[in-house]
Amino acid sequence: MAETIPHWLTKQADVVPNKLALELSDGTVYTFRELKEKSQSFARKLKQLGVDKGSHIGILSANHADMVIAIHAVSYIGAVAVLLNTRLTKQERTFQINDADVSVVIGQSGFRHADDDLHTFADVWNLPEPPATLQTELNLDDAFTIMYTSGTTGFPKGVVHTYGNHWWSAIGSVLNLGLNDSDKWLAVLPLFHVSGLSILLRSVIYGMSVYLLESYERQTVHTAIMERHVTIASVVTVMLKDLVEYLGEPRYPETFRCMLLGGGPAPKSLLEQAKSLRIPVFQSYGLTETASQIVTLRPADALEKLGSSGKPLVPAQLTIAEKDDGVGDIFVKGPMVTGGYYHNAEATESAFRDGWFATGDLGYTDADGFLYVSDRRKDLIISGGENIYPTEIENVLSAMEAIDEAGVVGKDDDTWGQIPVAFVVVNDPSVTAEIILEFVSRYLARYKQPRDIRFIDKLPRNASNKLMRHQLLT
Amino acid sequence: MAETIPHWLTKQADVVPNKLALELSDGTVYTFRELKEKSQSFARKLKQLGVDKGSHIGILSANHADMVIAIHAVSYIGAVAVLLNTRLTKQERTFQINDADVSVVIGQSGFRHADDDLHTFADVWNLPEPPATLQTELNLDDAFTIMYTSGTTGFPKGVVHTYGNHWWSAIGSVLNLGLNDSDKWLAVLPLFHVSGLSILLRSVIYGMSVYLLESYERQTVHTAIMERHVTIASVVTVMLKDLVEYLGEPRYPETFRCMLLGGGPAPKSLLEQAKSLRIPVFQSYGLTETASQIVTLRPADALEKLGSSGKPLVPAQLTIAEKDDGVGDIFVKGPMVTGGYYHNAEATESAFRDGWFATGDLGYTDADGFLYVSDRRKDLIISGGENIYPTEIENVLSAMEAIDEAGVVGKDDDTWGQIPVAFVVVNDPSVTAEIILEFVSRYLARYKQPRDIRFIDKLPRNASNKLMRHQLLT
């Protein structure tokens, strides 16, 4: 049955009107009532741009109060927010905007140069605000957001999340982490990623405060945890590493109860270091397709199962299609898992088997059923929490006339976890690494650009001519 | 979309196998793993009685570990549990068993005399246990329980709850009350009522301990709160009154964080008394049809809004169809509300208007949106937490040849809140109160039997001949 619930922000504005919904590092705060009023006002103004129920609206912004308001405004209209990664090149972004049938793009003024059709948040605020009908309820089967994720092959795919996917994700999390009236969740991960967005949605589903930072900066995050009564923070490995280094002797306050760690495997040494500093790290595993964490290690098990991602959240299930030695493909299932990719039946179909979603990642479960992720999606490179697919970079490299073939692989890096390195076979000896990098920079976001170009005679391939990327660095 | 989740008890047995699921006053405990194993074993044995997916199985028991196990066993089979009030007469119970198409009745041996077809729990445990397929998932759209409730007119109706109704009720509660790892909920209300059953289901949905008592006894409940680390208790007004009286000087421990009060309006004097003793009373409002509380007063508002039932839980909505002076019919909506009554399309249809459920109760909301219930369902008598419908008693009385007509009304009572009093017009002067009470006792549960029979010449009726019950006691 398609369940309908009252609009979550309106509900919190009713139940806890004066509680802080959003707190910014510059001291600006919004209560739930204020956030509702701003979001409804923004929604009425957005309608002036022709955005209506079912419209797809692109949002191009770094973390900012206006971005939060814009996202909630989209839900009041019943439109669909297509969340655009600010680091993409114009070419990458244009692909997503076209693929997702986006009719209007709004965002921060700083990105105006990047996209001439962008309506800035200020533009929208300046619009008139005639009365308009807004959603008072949310149908959990309705689409709410689209976020792009690349795959091992082909173009990026738009992951569609319904209100229900986000709702169930938030509920799965609360049944694992618990909930206190005083909880305040630190959002430093980008809101255009599901890891950041999910914090915003937990806020309006739980009636919980969020401390929002524009970007990661060690001193600001440290201060937030030490002094601003943050109780939970979501981070990726590269941040945890930096914070641990910065923390030194002092301890985080007792009230800081969860450092939710996502975005790829963490080195055991880092986890041990965090443990010795009594940082309550909860390892987790999730994908854009699972609307954030779907497997999380509970505090009670954290010490004994160091290195594990834990067990699937209450509404979720996990199975391993065993290959050898217990390691196999990780499949997940649950009402937080996306129904599929936007206008891409083929990709959707190949991602599901009997209702189970094929993550593409490899892992195993121990005798007690705890998940250990051995490898993120085949050849996936995770650099500072961002996913990089070698195929995407190889496709760009191979498009250069001077390059016959290319292979990209992740190289371990102390700071970023991994960085992409490209191996190329060229047909023109005059081509240099600089020329190649200049070419690549036109098509790929900075974080995807190879940090090193290595010239070789031949790529390692197996009998069926498949590129053996893992042999490139050996 | 019909959501499917892993079986909730299996899930907790996986995630927190060694945590206490159930604790009894005699010191017996069951971990989640043990409770799962016992319930699965009981399920396989039950199948020997012909109980299978879709079967309707009656459960006739006071609070007992076997009753908990039986209820979970029913969910492993995919059958439907028809929960029978142990206080009913054989005649009342037989009506429910027939109306609900019950094929097998199980229960405590103490009730064997009441129903010759009863299979005792011991009988079931003694059955062989061949391997059997059990449910590993729960489809939230599937029916799980049926409980009978009377109405203002006609026969009792079987309220059907799906797994989803119970799930959403538990989630609405957790988003209001929060959740800690150390939570332990006291279940002293009967499990055959939704107020008791819902505690069991929260237990397996949250992975939370339950302290189960067979029945209310002030010393035992007092000790549970003082010494057994209970953090939340569900009580009805008559119990709260008794506990407050018993408590005297000492204070409940700081860790006791919620006394969830349901089952009818509480006198303001009692709430004030509880407040002065720093008992964290949360007033609530709910019906069998709403799968327990649907409106609850948050702790933060408890002091300022004394006497209010609060605001609807996060997934729920409330509206008042105003009559006069702001008071009107209370309507509610949300995914915890029953889809309707078993095999009773007429009653179901008349209970809903545009998706809103007509509670039949009267109330109003103040300027801040807080609900105040003025009157429970028209003429409903609530005695010690049990609902009594005057019509049901009047129908029995009128069936006596010597009685021409009868009117029943609730009279305020210090101990029980209210007690039923009958006014009768007789055609035979030789009939006595004793004779009438003897007759009534054959058809009505003890708690429904009038405590007083008053003989009058004529019942007060309005112009359209409608009985004006509220004038009976004046």
Image: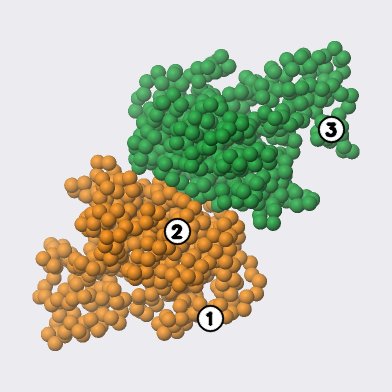
Chain colours: A orange, B green
Position of B474 with respect to A406 (left or right) is right
Q: Identify the mark at residue A184; answer none if there is no mark.
A: 2
The subunit letter for the residue under badge 3 reads B
Identify which residue is drawn at 79% across, 16% down: B433
Residue indicated by mark 3: B474
Task: Answer few, some or many: residues within 10 Å of disc 2's Cα (few below 14, many 20 plus, some between 14 and 19).
Answer: many
- Quote the CA–CA distance across marks 3 and 2: 56 Å
- What amino acid is at disc 2? Lys
Residue B265, quarter of the rendered image: top right
Residue indicated by mark 1: A123
Which quadrant, please, contains the C terminus of chain B? top right
- What amino acid is at disc 1? Asp
Residue A408, quarter of the rendered image: bottom left
Above/below status of A209 relative to B274: below
Query: In front here: B424 or B143?
Result: B424
Furthest residue in direction bottom, as rendered: A430
Position of B192 with respect to A454 (left or right) is right
